[in-house]
Image (tube, helix red, strand yellow):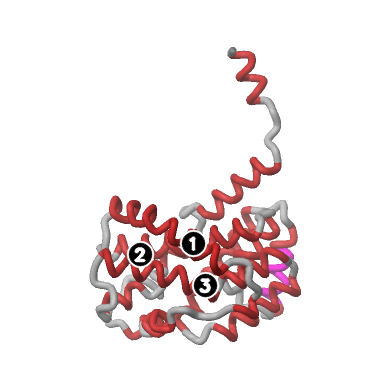
Amino acid sequence: MKMEINKESEKPASESDLLQWSQWQLLDSILPTGGFAHSFGLEAAIQVGIVTGPEDLQTFIIHVLENTASLLLPFVHSATMSPNMENWQRLDRMLNATLTNEVGRKASISQGSALMRVAAAVFSEIHLLKTMREACLGAGTVAFHHAPVFGLVCGLVGFDSRTSQRAYLFITMRDVISAATRLNLVGPMGAAVLQHRIAPVAEAILTKLMDRGAEESFQTAPLLDTVQGCHGYLFSRLFCS
């Protein structure tokens, strides 16, 4: 029995096995991309009275996921399908023109820049990541918006588009729920229960709105966009957005 176990452990890992490690790392909260510095407008929504308790919180998160899927998943999908310099720059310019909410736009650039820097260092075997980052930093040709960068990294690492889009919705849900915990809207146990409860809804949203080109991007929750835009006017605030 011991010999059989040792033989099994000596088998080389397959490409799909190694890919899962990359997938888990990109979704790990320890990856320093700055996502936990943003509440996606939740902090402002609490202060203006749109979100007052756990029930409002669940509705808010679902609206955020719907808006993320309709507005940003097309950029994740397009970048994953064609992870090259020309397409990435095109998508970045399109998203920069699309995001009229200054708070949300700055948050997107902040997280995207951090993700590109981290990905270029972590996935050092993918030389194109470092090359693209350095070329664009010097030329100033891209703003480094988060959704296209996320799709680009996923595409170069080897993710399929559906996995990339599901992962983007997951980190959005994770970050909003984390913000809710730090804002004392829900406790850690309640946050875990809420995340599990919303997962089927998130999957349904993904199924409905995935695999669209950037030209099909649209917004479903303009009120939330307006509220997030007011974040900079809050008298006291814990988050950057």
Q: Residues within 10 Å of mark 2 (few under 14, many from 20)?
A: many
Secondary structure under the numbered disc 3 in the rendered image: helix
Distance of mark 1 from mark 3, alpha carbons?
29 Å
Mark 1 vs mark 2, foreground winner is 1
The residue carrying mark 2 is 179
Q: Which mark is residue 110?
A: 3
The percent position of residue 34, horizontal first and vertical second, equals: 47, 64
Location of the N terminus (image quadrant): top right
Residue type marked 2: Ala
Residue type marked 3: Ser
Q: Nearer the viewer, residue 205 or 114?
A: 205
Q: Residues within 10 Å of mark 1 (few under 14, many from 20)?
A: few
Q: Does 112 sit above or below residue 219?
A: above
Would you say residue 137 sits in the magenta stretch? Answer: yes
Q: Which residues are magenta?
A: 130-138
Secondary structure under the numbered disc 2 in the rendered image: helix
Mark 2 vs mark 3, foreground winner is 2
Left or right of residue 13: residue 55:
left
- Residue at figure coordinates x 59%, y 45% from the top left: 21
Residue 221: quarter of image: bottom left
Would you say residue 215 sits in the magenta stretch? Answer: no
**Chief secondary structure of the magenta portion:** helix
Whichever of labels 2 and 3 marks the residue nearer the N terminus, that label is 3
Residue type marked 1: Ala
Q: Which mark is residue 204?
A: 1
